[in-house]
């Protein structure tokens, strides 16, 4: 079992370089961060009638800039997005950002992606909410073409370009690991179609679905898919359940807080997984 961390880094929390050093010193495998480019003031899908979106959603740092600082401060720590809202990003620009980060980190980047839930945020970027899963697939496929070919072309419904060149290429070949987040009915279809692993963040039926993922991958002649659980609770019961379910890596959710608070949380987790 591997253990990692995940956190919403903001302008009010511990900095990414400081955090990355603390995480690596304690022997964790990874540090993943999510992203939201902005939060619309009015949203059609609040969490619930009596619950507001947490403050850190409004203030989170750009993931690739934050992870560059984390990579520069460490030597072995895996860094990743959990998740990047690819449906809100230009694929050609994002392919270069990720290839650059993978190069500068010495091949330590993992690309967690998802289609998102915030309709207004997504549509402010020009993506039709109802078509976001198709957009995500085409952008991911197009980026893979850029990473794996000296001259790349892609022609789809949502993404189209012809004979472009882009360097650097990622250190990890053919690409950094692509992990798809989500828990919906079709998420395993997406993982098997164009990813290398799955990032669930809910426990119900998890063991059953992991077994299904491995069975279907084997039947399709694909390599074993890695399962990284994002945002685990800091308690022994959660660790036991996720281990029994067949998770490959448990990423513990750290509080979006000051350095002292985060360091105490890391020490608590370190004791938990000894």
Image (spheres, helix red, strand yellow):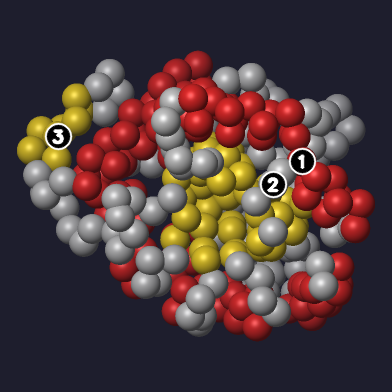
Image quadrant holding the N terminus, namely bottom right
Evaluate whether residue 148 shows in this view: yes
Which circle, 2 or 3, is nearer the viewer?
A: 2
- The local crowd at label 2, few if under 14, some if 14 to 19, many if 20 or more residues have their Cα within 10 Å, is many
Q: Secondary structure at mark 3?
A: strand
Task: Read off the residue under disc 1.
Answer: 245
Task: Give the x, y percent position of residue 12.
Answer: 68, 68
Q: Identify the residue at horizontal 56%, vertical 46% (top origin).
A: 226
Q: Quadrant of residue 156?
A: top left
Q: Are marks 2 and 1 in contact (CB under 8 Å)?
A: yes
- The local crowd at label 1, few if under 14, some if 14 to 19, many if 20 or more residues have their Cα within 10 Å, is some
The answer to whether 99 appears left or right of 71 in the picture is left
Task: Read off the residue under disc 2.
Answer: 247
Decide: is 210 above or below 244. above
Task: Give the x, y percent position of residue 221.
Answer: 42, 31
Evaluate whether residue 56 shows in this view: no
Q: Which mark is residue 80?
A: none
Task: Read off the residue under disc 3.
Answer: 153
Q: Identify the residue at horizontal 47%, vertical 74% (top origin).
A: 71
Q: Secondary structure at mark 2?
A: loop
C-alpha span from label 2 to label 3: 36 Å
Q: Secondary structure at mark 1?
A: helix
Q: Earlier in the sequence, mark 1 or mark 3?
A: 3
The answer to whether 161 appears left or right of 70 in the picture is left
Task: Give the x, y percent position of residue 146.
Answer: 21, 45
Residue in front for this viewpoint, 159 or 175: 175
């Amino acid at each position: 079992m591997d253990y990692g961390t995940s956190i919403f880094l903001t302008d009010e929390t511990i900095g990414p370089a400081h955090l990355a050093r603390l995480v690596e010193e304690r022997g964790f495998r990874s540090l993943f961060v999510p992203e939201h480019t902005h939060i619309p003031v009015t949203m059609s899908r609040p969490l619930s009638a009596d619950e507001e979106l947490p403050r850190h959603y409004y203030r989170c740092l750009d993931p690739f800039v934050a992870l560059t600082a984390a990579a520069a401060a460490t030597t072995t720590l895996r860094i990743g997005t959990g998740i990047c809202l690819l449906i809100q990003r230009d694929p050609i620009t994002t392919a270069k950002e990720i290839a650059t980060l993978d190069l500068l980190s010495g091949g330590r980047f993992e690309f967690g992606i998802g289609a998102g839930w915030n309709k207004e945020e997504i549509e402010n970027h020009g993506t039709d909410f109802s078509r976001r899963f198709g957009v995500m697939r085409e952008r991911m496929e197009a980026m893979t073409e850029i990473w794996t070919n000296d001259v790349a072309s892609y022609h789809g419904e949502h993404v189209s370009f012809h004979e472009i060149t882009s360097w650097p290429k990622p250190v990890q070949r053919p690409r950094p690991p692509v992990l798809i987040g989500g828990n919906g009915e079709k998420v395993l279809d997406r993982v098997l179609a164009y990813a290398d692993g799955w990032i669930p963040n809910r426990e119900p039926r998890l063991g059953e679905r992991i077994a299904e993922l491995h069975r279907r991958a084997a039947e399709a002649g694909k390599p074993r898919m890695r399962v990284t659980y994002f945002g685990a609770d800091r308690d022994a019961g959660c660790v036991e359940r996720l281990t029994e379910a067949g998770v490959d890596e448990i990423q513990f959710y750290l509080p979006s807080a000051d350095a002292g608070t985060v360091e105490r949380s890391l020490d608590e987790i370190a004791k938990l997984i000894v």
